Image: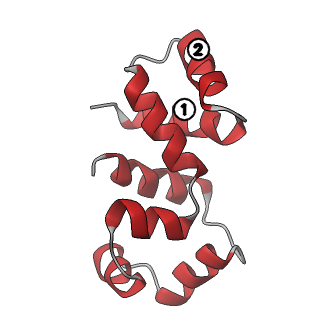
Amino acid sequence: MVSYSTFSQAFRLARGCETESEYVQICTDAGLETGEDIFKRIYVIAKMSWRERREKILGISRAEMHRRYQIPIRTLEDWEAGKYKPADYIEILLAYTLLQK
């Protein structure tokens, strides 16, 4: 599996890329050590909304996400509505846990 450090770099790069192929090439050029299939999965996760991540990857309700990660339900609602964004480090850490699924 990819290290957290590599994931963090790759995830940040993914948010700035328009296409998956552009992203994979940038990661390769940057010398990030992991397989192309992992890059593609990271790209997909980075481009998903919080609701999509919760529903499609975890397959859980907001209430269950609250129980698992101790994130207030109102905060989850605000993230999913686009009202607020989580701090960068929180988004990356939670996204990293999704890669493990």
Label 2 secondary element: loop
Name the residue that disc number 2 marks.
30
Q: Is residue 58 left or right of residue 85?
A: left
What residue appears at the point 66 percent right and 23 percent down from the top-left corner? 22
Is tag 2's residue or tag 1's residue first in the polypeptide sequence? Answer: 1
Answer whether labels 2 and 1 touch (C-beta < 8 Å). Answer: yes
Q: Is residue 7 left or right of residue 22?
A: left
Task: Place residue 37 in its image quadrant.
Answer: top left
Look at the picture and state if 32 lies above or below 83.
above
What residue appears at the point 60 percent right and 49 percent down from the top-left corner? 47
Q: Which mark is drawn over residue 52?
A: none
Look at the picture and state if 98 lies above or below 67.
above
Please name whichever residue, 87 or 68, is drawn nearer the observer in this view of the structure: 68
Name the residue that disc number 1 marks.
9
Task: Place residue 77 in its image quadrant.
Answer: bottom right
What amino acid does circle 1 point to? Answer: Gln
Measuring from the top left, give residue 53's x and y in whole percent.
46, 62
What amino acid does circle 2 point to? Answer: Ala
Label 1 secondary element: helix
What residue appears at the point 61 percent right and 36 percent down from the top-left corner? 14
Measuring from the top left, give residue 50's x and y in whole percent.
54, 66
Calculate the distance from the C-alpha at mark 2 to the C-alpha at mark 1: 10 Å
Q: Is residue 97 left or right of residue 17?
A: left
